Image (cartoon, rainbow, N blue to C red):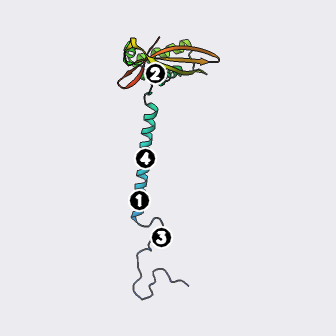
Amino acid sequence: MTAPQGWVPDGSEPSTRPPAPVGPTAGPRYSHVLALCAAVLLVAAAVAGVVVHQTVTANPGTPQETAEAFMSAGLRQDWRASWELLCGPERLDHGSVDRYLLVKGATAAMVGMSDERVTVSAGDARPHPDAGPEAHLVEVRLARAGETHDLQLVVVEEDGDWRACGQL
């Protein structure tokens, strides 16, 4: 037989305090630990997001990667990405980014450009002395259904990044 709640065997007054909690919710320390864990997870997720964003949006590291990225952006009609990869003189020739987006979009609509099954591959990159010491000439091949088209893209280094700067 169990004693009634609040019964004290020595005859003193019964306690009005509820029994102490048992388990993981015992005390304020648990809530502090839980809040700290949540904060650490939140910071880790934010850092991971920044790292992924910088990795995805980082400029290509070689002239060949820049040439591939530039041509691929054009094929998928991502004009903003292709603008970001253009060199300064080419940007000046095109005017503002808004004009570039408008002209490229209209041209693609009229010509019916499509990136379906087109692959882009960059080959050799060699210095292009006529365009300056920081310029390279990159061999680019576009291929689709057994057909290929080869071109040479000038890629220059500007402010530590590689930029597409015209085609020969």
Q: Marks 4 and 1: in contact by CB < 8 Å?
A: no
Q: What's the CA distance linking mark 2 and mark 1?
A: 48 Å
In terms of sequence position, does the residue under pointer 1 or pointer 3 come before the other?
3
In terms of sequence position, does the residue under pointer 3 or pointer 4 come before the other?
3
Q: Secondary structure at mark 4?
A: helix
Residue wearing tag 1: 33
Name the image quarter holding the N terminus: bottom right
Q: Which mark is residue 82?
A: 2
Q: What's the CA distance linking mark 2 and mark 4?
A: 32 Å
Tell me which amino acid carries mark 3. Val
Tell me which amino acid carries mark 2. Ser
User: Going by the image, does 92 lie left or right of 77?
Assistant: left
In terms of sequence position, does the residue under pointer 2 or pointer 4 come before the other?
4
User: In the rendering, at what x and y percent does residue 6 appear?
Assistant: 45, 80
Residue wearing tag 3: 22
Question: Which residue is nearer to you in this view: 12 or 60?
Answer: 60
Q: Nearer the viewer, mark 1 or mark 3?
A: 1
Q: Residues within 10 Å of mark 2 (few under 14, many from 20)?
A: many
Given the current orientation, which residue lies at the most extreme left position? Answer: 159
Question: In percent of the image, x 48 and y 67: which residue is there?
Answer: 23
Q: What's the CA distance linking mark 1 and mark 4?
A: 16 Å
Q: Nearer the viewer, mark 2 or mark 1?
A: 2
Q: Secondary structure at mark 1?
A: helix
Given the current orientation, which residue lies at the most extreme right position? Answer: 146
Q: What's the CA distance linking mark 3 and mark 2?
A: 62 Å
